[in-house]
Image: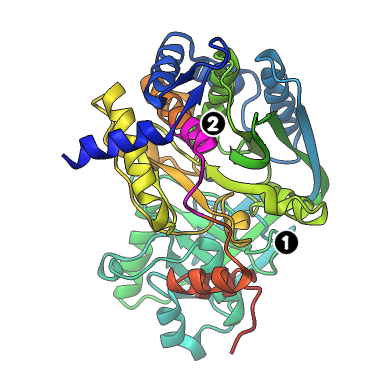
């Protein structure tokens, strides 16, 4: 009953124009059917990603590969008929790994350097085990940390599984604050998997070395420490860093009625260098391009303007999205950004996370009910929890409503996050097709509804929102808290 009622309301609210039928108004469900058919028959998301990973390889920001990736997606937007495609250049600190050697009591163990670690380091110190590396662990060992190399999990320990984990960069920031000489991270994934990623909360180089070892190596070290053995670690590393230019790529689909209201659908194109970043974030960024292709192929009319944005520099600390938000503030366009949808490692969308904007729930449920009519396998798995550390963050901190599709992929896919197994073989073509058709439908509805329930927050409302969602501590550690600290 509730379903029937909400469907009736949705169809009444949404009128979806389609250019082939001048002036004839179509209900959303008709537009969704067109989208569905177009994507199932003609999606090129999987093939484009395959081509990019085969011909370019990784897409690390500021490298020749990164450059090639920017040009590759620019030409795809052009090929799909977008007349307004722009590069938005920004300056950043590049970081490249050269070599790393980590030894424990003289025996070498396999590690990878985390990004933004020093250009050169050779540090030897006693190892101290801080378990999950949460604030409570640092407080407990406070006096003993200075001058030591801290050992901690990337994930939380099983016994801490109820506490909210911190990002690796936040844990490293705590280590620096407590005077540690270096950081040894233990990965959470079994199978000798090494994880990279930034250790810096700002994207600037940090002063101490930080590396990641496998779960198996970490467990062995802990067994030795439990038996009372004192461990000395030596971390030698060489990295390279320089100022570089990178480019976000933006393709604009102009709105027909409310063209100054802009919906951004974005995701990061850049990847780490250990593999090809097929999952993080090839599946998200190449889905966005195919959503753009779908809108263009069907010549869909939308009330609002849509900007399809591929960010660079996300992995180094959201550099591209921060640059875009900064530019929009300087040019006075920030108030025009009505909504931001972020696709980061989104494959097989099965609903939407509203990031704490609960006022969007009934709208989202009603759209998802229409999607379910088109395809009954769509789970309509909607949720609302706010978090950090992807390209939605700079928008959220400006009070702009953000959301992301919820995603459902196999565990082995997630296990290759930031590691050397993030290759194209992990990508499932059907998942990408689902991603493109369901997110296209939702985006179409959002761009056409008369009134979007979530509005921009004022500075004060944003502050209260972040506190309510327990993000203040993390933002303080990340040096992103812009309000006074009492
Ligand atoms: Zn990512």
Left or right position of 292 against 190: right
Asked whether 432 or 66 is in front, the reply is 432
**Quick one: quadrant of the C terminus?**
bottom right
Left or right position of 82 against 196: right
One can see residue 198 in this view: yes
Q: Earlier in the sequence, mark 1 or mark 2?
A: 1
Asked if marks 1 and 2 touch (Cβ < 8 Å), the reply is: no
187 up-or-down from 262: above or below: below
**Quick one: quadrant of the N terminus?**
top left
Residue depicted at x 30% and y 22%? 374
154 up-or-down from 336: above or below: below
Secondary element at image label 2: helix
Query: Which scheme is used to colour this image of the protein?
Result: rainbow
Q: Position of residue 402 (x, y in %)?
A: 52, 51
Q: Which mark is residue 204?
A: 1
Q: Position of residue 50 (x, y in %)?
A: 53, 18
83 up-or-down from 463: above or below: above
Q: Which mark is residue 282?
A: 2
One can see residue 409 in this view: no
Q: Label 1: few (<14), some or many (≥20) within 10 Å?
A: many
Asked whether 476 or 289 is in front, the reply is 289
Q: Position of residue 381 (x, y in %)?
A: 29, 42
Residue depicted at x 32% and y 46%? 382
Residue 137 is a magenta residue: no
Secondary element at image label 1: loop
| Residue range (magenta) | 442-454
Residue depicted at x 56% and y 9%? 20
63 up-or-down from 45: above or below: below
Mark 1 vs mark 2, CA separation in Å: 25 Å
Asked whether 141 or 68 is in front, the reply is 68
């Amino acid at each position: 009953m509730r379903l029937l009622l909400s469907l009736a309301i949705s169809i009444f609210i949404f009128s979806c124009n389609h250019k082939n039928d001048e002036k004839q108004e179509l209900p959303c469900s008709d537009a969704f059917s067109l989208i569905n058919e177009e994507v199932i028959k003609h999606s090129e998301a999987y093939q484009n990603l395959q081509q990019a990973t085969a011909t370019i390889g990784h897409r690390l920001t500021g490298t020749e590969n990164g450059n090639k990736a920017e040009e590759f997606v620019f030409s795809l937007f052009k090929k799909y008929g977008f007349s307004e495609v722009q590069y938005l250049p920004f300056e950043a600190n590049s970081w490249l790994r050269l070599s790393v050697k980590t030894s424990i009591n003289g025996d070498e163990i396999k590690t990878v350097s985390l990004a933004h670690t020093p250009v050169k380091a050779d540090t030897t110190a006693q190892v101290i085990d801080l378990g999950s590396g949460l604030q409570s662990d640092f407080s407990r060992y406070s006096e003993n940390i200075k001058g030591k190399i801290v050992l901690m999990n990337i994930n939380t320990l099983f016994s801490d599984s109820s506490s909210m984990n911190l990002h690796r960069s936040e844990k490293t920031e705590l280590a620096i604050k407590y005077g540690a000489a270096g950081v040894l991270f233990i990965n959470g994934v079994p199978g000798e998997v090494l994880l990279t990623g930034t250790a810096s909360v700002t994207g600037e180089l940090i002063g101490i070395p930080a590396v990641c070892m496998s779960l198996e190596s970490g467990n062995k070290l802990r067994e030795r420490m439990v038996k009372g053995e004192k461990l000395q670690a030596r971390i030698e590393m060489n990295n390279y860093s320089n100022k570089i230019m990178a480019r976000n790529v933006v393709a604009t689909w102009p709105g027909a009625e409310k063209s100054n209201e802009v919906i951004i659908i974005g995701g990061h194109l850049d990847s780490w260098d250990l593999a090809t970043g097929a999952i993080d974030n090839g599946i998200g960024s190449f889905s966005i391009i195919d959503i753009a292709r779908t809108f263009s192929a069907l010549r869909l009319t939308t009330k609002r303007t849509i900007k399809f944005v591929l960010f660079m520099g996300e992995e180094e600390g959201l550099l591209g999205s921060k640059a875009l938000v900064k530019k929009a503030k300087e040019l006075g366009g920030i108030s025009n950004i009505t909504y931001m949808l972020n696709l980061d490692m989104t494959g097989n969308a099965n609903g939407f996370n509203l990031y704490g904007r609960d006022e969007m729930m009934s709208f989202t449920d009603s759209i998802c009910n229409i999607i379910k009519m088109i395809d009954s396998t769509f789970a309509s798995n909607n949720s609302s929890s706010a978090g950090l550390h992807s390209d939605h963050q700079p928008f959220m901190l400006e009070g702009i409503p953000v959301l992301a599709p919820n995603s459902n992929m196999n565990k082995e896919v997630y296990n290759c996050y930031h590691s050397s197994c993030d290759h194209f073989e992990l990508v499932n073509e059907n998942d990408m097709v689902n991603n493109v058709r369901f997110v296209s439908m939702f985006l179409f509805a959002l761009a056409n509804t008369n009134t979007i329930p979530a509005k921009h927050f004022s500075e004060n409302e944003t502050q209260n929102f972040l506190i309510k969602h327990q993000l203040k501590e993390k933002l303080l550690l990340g040096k992103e808290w812009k309000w006074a600290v009492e």
